[in-house]
Image (tube, rainbow, N blue to C red):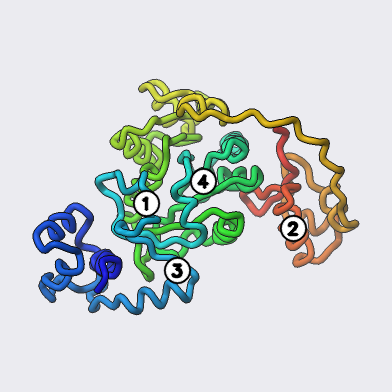
């Protein structure tokens, strides 16, 4: 058994973390030897089955996933420096993305349009400054942040609260594919088959904070996973930043409390880079971009979509095209950065930057 295989095995037990494994390595000289000496009744999976490393590796190949352990050279060092780093990461996409300088963007799933717009704009601004964005790939603020990153042609990293083969939430599966195709990554520390539950999300939040140089809260009520992630960041010595919102909105209450408690108030990506000391090299003025050319059907869709958004059902009625065609056109325009998707199965024109 190799050290990598031993780490995979220990991770499959779901009973031994890196602190306990470090003690076993010190006692037996290696993780592989520690596994050999582990009593048989402890060498079982969370579901009570015998550990099958070969099956886990085969599943990784089937799904196109790379398994990276804490003893592998491509394991992100910023994460490894944290005391509670995962033994194993399951990565779909570019593993080196996890080692880029990154900011975590977190917030409520039930975001306001203001929160979604700001998350998108800040994600795009960070991407344009070559700063990766980490989130929990949840609905709401997480998704809007990553959509902004993709529009800015940057690196997005989504950390799941489930195994990669038990993707949650289903509504963001296509977003995860877009992130991977754009050179980012979807990552989980959970073995194949692990469903999300109330214990997995706090664990996921710790990784989100640990992969980042700092955490930005966009919208959050006073009791939320967002504030728990911010607390994890503070424990790690990471700066916490927050976007102000309406004083009469419960979805801004958490961010306003953070600011009152000393978090840096930010307005945009430039404020975040200033707080983190990230210098952005000045770029030469870009040549004027050619005017985009659209097909007749694409033009028809865009003429009937406003900045505030329109439902897909209404758009189908306005264009008199079939539903499948409208969906395909909207997806194509979204990938071109000409449309954005909104909650409630709506689409809208891009925001003014």
The numbered mark at residue 165 is: 3
- 346 vs 5, nearest the viewer: 5
Q: Look at the image and tell me whether residue 171 can be seen.
A: no
The Cα atoms of the two marked residues, 1 and 3, are separated by 16 Å
Residue sitting at x 59%, y 35%: 129
Above or below residue 180? Residue 34 is: below
Residue sitting at x 47%, y 41%: 102
CB contact under 8 Å: marks 2 and 1: no
The Cα atoms of the two marked residues, 1 and 4, are separated by 13 Å
The numbered mark at residue 112 is: none
Q: Earlier in the sequence, mark 1 or mark 4?
A: 4
The answer to whether residue 116 is left or right of residue 38 is right
The residue to which callout 4 is attached is 142
The residue to which callout 2 is attached is 332
The answer to whether residue 26 is left or right of residue 260 is left
Q: Look at the image and tell me whether residue 100 can be seen.
A: yes
- 172 vs 66, nearest the viewer: 66
Residue 110: give x, y in percent of width and height. 51, 44
Residue 134: give x, y in percent of width and height. 47, 45
Secondary structure state at the residue bearing disc 1:
helix
Q: Earlier in the sequence, mark 2 or mark 4?
A: 4
């Amino acid at each position: 058994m190799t050290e990598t295989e031993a780490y995979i095995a220990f991770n499959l037990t779901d009973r031994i973390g890196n602190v306990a494994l470090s003690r076993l390595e010190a006692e037996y000289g290696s993780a592989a030897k520690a596994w050999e000496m582990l009593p048989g009744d402890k060498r079982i999976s969370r579901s009570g089955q015998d550990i099958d490393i070969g099956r886990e590796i085969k599943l990784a190949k089937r799904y196109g996933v790379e398994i990276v352990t804490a003893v592998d050279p491509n394991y992100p060092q910023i994460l490894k420096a944290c005391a509670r780093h995962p033994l194993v990461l399951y990565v779909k996409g570019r593993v080196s993305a996890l080692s880029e300088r990154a900011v975590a963007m977190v917030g409520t799933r039930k975001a306001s349009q203001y929160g979604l717009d700001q998350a998108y704009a800040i994600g795009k601004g960070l991407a344009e400054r070559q700063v990766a964005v980490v989130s929990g790939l949840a609905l709401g603020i997480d998704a809007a942040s990553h959509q902004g990153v993709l529009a800015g042609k940057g690196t997005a990293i989504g950390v799941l609260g489930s195994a990669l083969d038990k993707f949650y939430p289903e509504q963001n599966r296509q977003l995860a594919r877009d992130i991977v195709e754009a050179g980012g990554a979807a990552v989980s520390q959970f073995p194949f088959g692990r469903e999300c539950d109330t214990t997995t999300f706090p664990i996921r939040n710790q990784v989100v904070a640990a992969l980042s140089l700092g955490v930005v809260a966009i919208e959050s009520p006073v009791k939320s996973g967002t504030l728990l992630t911010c607390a994890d960041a503070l424990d790690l010595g990471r700066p916490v930043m927050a976007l102000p919102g309406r004083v009469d909105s419960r979805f801004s209450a958490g961010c306003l409390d953070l600011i009152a408690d000393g978090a840096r108030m930010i307005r945009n990506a430039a404020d975040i880079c200033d707080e983190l000391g990230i210098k952005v090299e000045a770029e030469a003025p870009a040549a004027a971009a050619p005017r985009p050319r659209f097909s007749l059907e694409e033009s028809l869709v865009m003429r009937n979509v406003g900045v505030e958004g329109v439902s897909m059902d209404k758009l189908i009625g306005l264009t008199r095209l079939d539903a499948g065609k409208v969906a395909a056109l909207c997806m194509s325009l979204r990938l071109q950065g000409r449309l954005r998707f909104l909650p409630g199965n709506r689409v809208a024109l891009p925001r003014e930057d």
